Amino acid sequence: MTTDVTGASPWFALGEDHQLILEQVERFAKDRFWPLQARMDDDEWWPEDAFPVLGEAGYLGCTVPQEFGGAGLDFFTSALVLQAVSKWNPSVGLGILAHENLCLNNILHNASPELCERYVPGMCDGTIVGALGLTEPGAGSDALGSMRTTARRDGDDYVLNGTKLYITNGPIADVVLVYAKTSPDKGAHGITAFAVDTDAPGFAVAQKMIKMGMRGSQTAEIVFEDCRVPVANVVGEVDKGVRVVMSGLDLERIGLAFMMIGMCERALELSVDYAKSRQQFGQAIGQFQFVQGMVADIYAETESLRAFCYQVGAEVNGIAHGASREHVSKRAAAVVLQAGLVLMRCVDRAVQIHGGAGYIWEMEVNRLYRAGKLLQIGAGTNEVRRIIIARELLGR
Ligand SMILES: Cc1cc2nc3c(=O)[nH]c(=O)nc-3n(C[C@H](O)[C@H](O)[C@H](O)COP(=O)(O)OP(=O)(O)OC[C@H]3O[C@@H](n4cnc5c(N)ncnc54)[C@H](O)[C@@H]3O)c2cc1C
């Protein structure tokens, strides 16, 4: 039994269309994905029909023009989808983020019309699953500078060699947007993006990675051994891959922050329910001021995060209308940094309110706690986020 304890506040700053979509996706995610949480976490299982089901409901490719099979809506709407889904199943939220923000959008905005035709409609209806391959064993925070994966031109193909690590959706993807060095002597300015079909010869999933949280989300190490990719699969211009990475990164960070609103909301609901139902010393633990304080803090922090996220989300809707990239990068890094800090404080309090029960693996609050930590690491760690903000404030 859960309680909507957020009252009227979820609708703060939202227009009617955004409100409706948020409500609709929440109902859908609670119905379809909440019941799968436990199995996904216990067995590291991904429901095979998750993407087609999301596609059929119209929740993939929110920002994709209708002629490519998308909904033609704004970025804010796609972020609300992430918020609503992640509240009821953070692993599914992460899968959508990797598919849509990291892969689909970058293909749509940078690839040739032929590649868009080939991939985008299927990615909108969920029959093609996407992933992003950037991180490597020796290239994490310094993903571009330390990249070792290479792509050598050979006739009408490029031949890729290298390893990519921690790739979300890697074990289930049909296409991976891969970054590789085409001009190794040019450093970060010699990187190219490729759309690589996972049935290409020389592509392999080396291992599925076992994680502490977000366990339903599938994560892989992938390898390229003389993997042949047609020249036509270059996304953007040769040696201009940095432009492709950078074009999507800010939106990814904001999407991640919206995911965390949903997770904080859920931490609050679980905490309130438990505080009302758990009896100690002859009364509900919610009658004790220490517990009341923790509940109040989760609420206050969640609402302040929501306000900041919605503000930045609205600003980013305006990227196309002239907001400078530097401004947006600083704001995106700040909102995801703040979201990660708030989320971990909220889930920590939520586990504390649950006492010993919160420490038990199968409890939803325990899953939230384990899932939350990733969101201070992926898409740039807290430290990298701080570096970006400070660079914009203080200069290089
Ligand atoms: C579950 C999961 C899913 C992921 N999904 C994807 C994906 O789909 N695609 C993809 O390409 N990648 C993905 N990643 C990779 C993720 O983006 C990286 O893990 C992250 O960028 C950090 O890189 P790293 O793990 O190599 O850590 P490192 O870069 O090795 O960092 C280790 C520590 O050093 C700190 N540090 C590093 N450099 C600095 C510095 N200059 N100043 C201060 N501190 C510093 C870091 O903040 C961190 O605390 C995923 C990771 C995980 C765990």
Image (spheres, grey):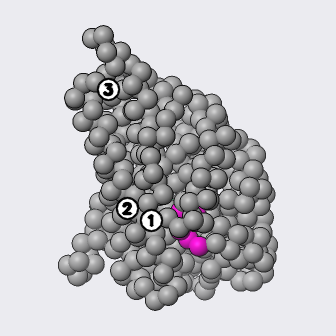
- Asked whether the viewer can see residue 368, the reply is no
Q: Is residue 77 magenta?
A: yes
Helix, strand or loop at disc 2? helix
Alpha carbon distance from label 3 to label 2: 27 Å
Q: Which residues are magenta?
A: 74-79
Residue at 71% in and 53% down: 54
**Label 1 Cα crowd, 10 Å radius (few <14 / some 14-19 / many 20+):** some
Helix, strand or loop at disc 1? loop
Left or right: 313 in relation to 109? left
- Magenta stretch, main secondary structure, is helix
**Label 2 Cα crowd, 10 Å radius (few <14 / some 14-19 / many 20+):** some
The N terminus sits in image quarter: top right
Amino acid at dot 3: Gly
Q: Residue furthest top?
A: 282
- State the residue position of label 3: 286
- State the residue position of label 2: 307
Residue 110: x and y in percent read 62, 81
Left or right: 351 in relation to 110? left
Left or right: 356 in relation to 147? left
89 versus 98 height, above or below: above
The earlier-in-sequence mark between 3 and 1 is: 1
Does the beta carbon of the residue at mark 2 sit less than 8 Å from ligand 1?
A: no
The earlier-in-sequence mark between 3 and 2 is: 3
